[in-house]
Image (tube, helix red, strand yellow):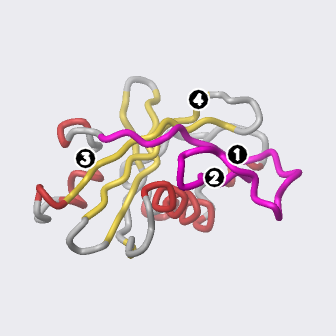
Amino acid sequence: MLEQSADSENMPDEDDMDDLSGLYWTPPGEMQREDVHKNLAEAIAGRQPDQVKLFSASAFEIPSAFPAGFFDVAIDIAAHEACGVYRAYRDGNDYATKPEWFSSKLKDTDEIFAEVYGRLMKSGFFDWYFHGGRPGEPVDQSAVANGV
């Protein structure tokens, strides 16, 4: 599996040098509030708008480099918390997982994206990928059972 370094380059994890599975993502870029998925918008509602930074990165499959979706992240600078969603467009619909807040203290943006990915991996959300397929159903906007 690949991990993001502090300077946004994909770096091989020494324990998984032969593992060519999972996802990698582009360097995160800032996004506007009007561009966030409703799941992320609901998560940041009530927080100080000037204290919440929003970022997005395109996700790609390893090793094919096939476009897989996006990771969108909100970072509350004042509360030292972050949350994020995996987002995909399917059949003209914009789907995303549910975000879950976690501590972002002492983490840079790339570490926060890795945390969101790691939480989704631990939840089993990407199990469809490891079985050599695509999700049978699009990512559900209420995918509480499947992920973050």
> Dividing the picture into quarters, in which one does residue 103 lie?
bottom left
Please give the label number shown on residue 126.
Answer: 2
Q: Is residue 13 above or below residue 31?
A: below
Name the residue: 42% across, 73% down: 106
Q: Within the magenta stretch, is there residue 81? A: no
Check the picture and name the quadrant holding the C terminus: bottom left
Q: Within the magenta stretch, is there residue 12? A: yes
Q: Are marks 2 and 4 in contact (CB under 8 Å)?
A: no
Q: Are marks 3 and 1 in contact (CB under 8 Å)?
A: no
Lower position in the chain sequence, tag 3 or tag 2: 3
The residue carrying mark 1 is: 129
For the residues labelled 2 and 1, the Cα–Cα distance comes to 5 Å
Q: Is residue 147 above or below residue 30?
A: below
The reply, left or right, for residue 29 in relation to residue 137 is left
Closest to the camera, between mark 3 and mark 4, is 4
The residue carrying mark 3 is: 38
Name the residue: 35% across, 65% down: 82
The residue carrying mark 4 is: 67
Q: Residue 86 at what x, y percent from top left?
A: 46, 48
Helix, strand or loop status at disc 4: strand
